[in-house]
Image (cartoon, rainbow, N blue to C red):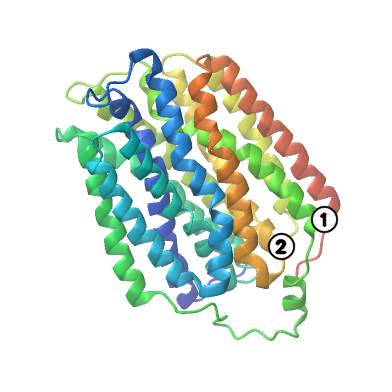
Amino acid sequence: MGKLSPATLRLVLLVSCGHALVHIYEQSLGSVEELAVEDSSFDIPADRQKKVSGELGNWLRLPFGFCAFLSGWLADRFGAKRLLLIYLFGCSAAAVMAWYSPTIFLLTMSMFLLGLFASIYHPAGVGLITHHTNPENRPMALGYHGIFGSAGLAAGPLLAGLVLNTGATWQQYYLVLAVPGTVLGLLFVVFLPRNHEDPHGADPSSSSDRRDDDAYWSSYVVLLSTACMTGIVYAAILHFLPRYLGEAGLTVPGIPEKSLRNYITAGVLVLGIFGQYGAGRIARPATLERLVAGSFFAAAPCVLWMASAEGPARIWAAALFAPLFFMHQPLYNSMIAKYVPRRRRSLCFGLSFTVGFGVGSFGPNLAGHINNYAILYSILAAMLAVCGLLALTLWRWHGPVQEP
């Protein structure tokens, strides 16, 4: 396993803070969706509230995915730092708009803008990290990056629970979210490198760099197919996860139910860190495909368990799902860097996140219209099983290979 130099590690950790924050923004609506649609000022009938919540989640995630391709092209064209600054300050502004929104239309618009600015992060941030790493240390760098992402997913509901526990409203939660984006944006201005130059000064004629510029487009297309399905699974489960876990029936004296369900969600999602870290530690260029297949095959039964679980068993099923599912993310991103040319990485990451988060944006809408957990989660488990088969296909095509 290649080690990260101190300078590269600092860059990875700084950019990864942006990754944590983008998932706080992404999960922000899921943390307060039930409170938002029940708000009397919106006057939404009780029998339509879950459907409206799913549609709001769709509007947040739609640009989050489908605009990522354009963001990747812009990052390759104008540089990651500029794009990352637009992401941070834009999300802060959208959060302020959500705080202000007096109508469901304005709330929908603020969710759309939040997703639009958040779409910039992944192609720009992940592309920047891959430009400063090599095939040996890249899985570890992306493992750290994934750890921060899982921490952000957990921090979203945790922060919501803490804010709501003070007696604040769901609107005030969004006002709080405007602060970290502004602060991190100022830190990026000062500390983030201006360009994509390789700090190691690698020789373009070296065999490793030539391998880095090889292109396996058919494999990349198969990988995009897995992104479609995992994106739906990811978004459908996460958007309603606080509601799902809140129905487990747990109560804690002194903690309101609206806060407790977010605390439980945070505890479940933080377990994803173990999957991200473990995958980053054990991955090698030759084992990426097999490990990704293993992640999907292991997570599918957990989703089936979630389909039938009742009471506290829901918490155990979700807690097992999180680390097994999220371990695929650093491996998946390393596979993109393995399959596409170096000079097109941000663009290809952008297309990948467009497919994953864009198609995945319909996950909350699907979940909002299927009230039966057994049916919904059975469909999602089948998708993960298909993804595992596709990953095995990639292994047959590429492994075993020699270390670059």
Q: Earlier in the sequence, mark 2 or mark 1?
A: 2
* Residue displayed at 57% across by 15% down: 374
Q: Is residue 346 left or right of residue 177?
A: right
Q: Residues within 10 Å of mark 1 (few under 14, many from 20)?
A: some
- Residue 182's spot in the image, x, y percent? 28, 61
Which residue corresponds to the image point at 33% horizontal and 61% vertical from the top-left? 89
| Residue neighbourhood size for the residue with mark 2, other residues' Cα within 10 Å, grouped as few (<14), some (14–19), many (≥20) | many
Q: Are marks 2 and 1 in contact (CB under 8 Å)?
A: yes
Residue 293 bears which disc, if any? none
Q: Which residue occupies 75% across, 85% down? A: 205
The answer to whether 100 appears left or right of 60 in the picture is left
- Disc 1 marks which residue? 398
Quadrant occupied by the N terminus: bottom right
The image position of residue 56, as x and y in percent, is 41, 33
| Image vertical order of residue 364 relative to residue 113, above or below | above
Q: Is residue 349 left or right of residue 206?
A: left
- The answer to which image quadrant residue 281 occupies is bottom right
* Label 2: element kind: helix
Helix or strand or loop: what does disc 1 sit on? helix
Most extreme residue toward the left, as rendered?
167
Tell me which residue sits at (33%, 15%) in the image. Answer: 45
Q: Position of residue 384 (x, y in %)?
A: 66, 33
Which quarter of the figure has residue 341? bottom right
For this orientation, the residue located farthest to the right is 397
User: Which residue in the protein does label 2 denote?
Assistant: 338
**Residue type, mark 1 in image:** His
Residue 240 spot, x, y in % from top left:
43, 28
Between 303 and 196, the one nearer to me in the picture: 196
Write down the quadrant of residue 29 in the picture.
Answer: top left
The answer to whether residue 240 is seen in the rendering is no
Establish if 375 lies above or below 74.
above
Q: Is residue 346 visible?
A: yes
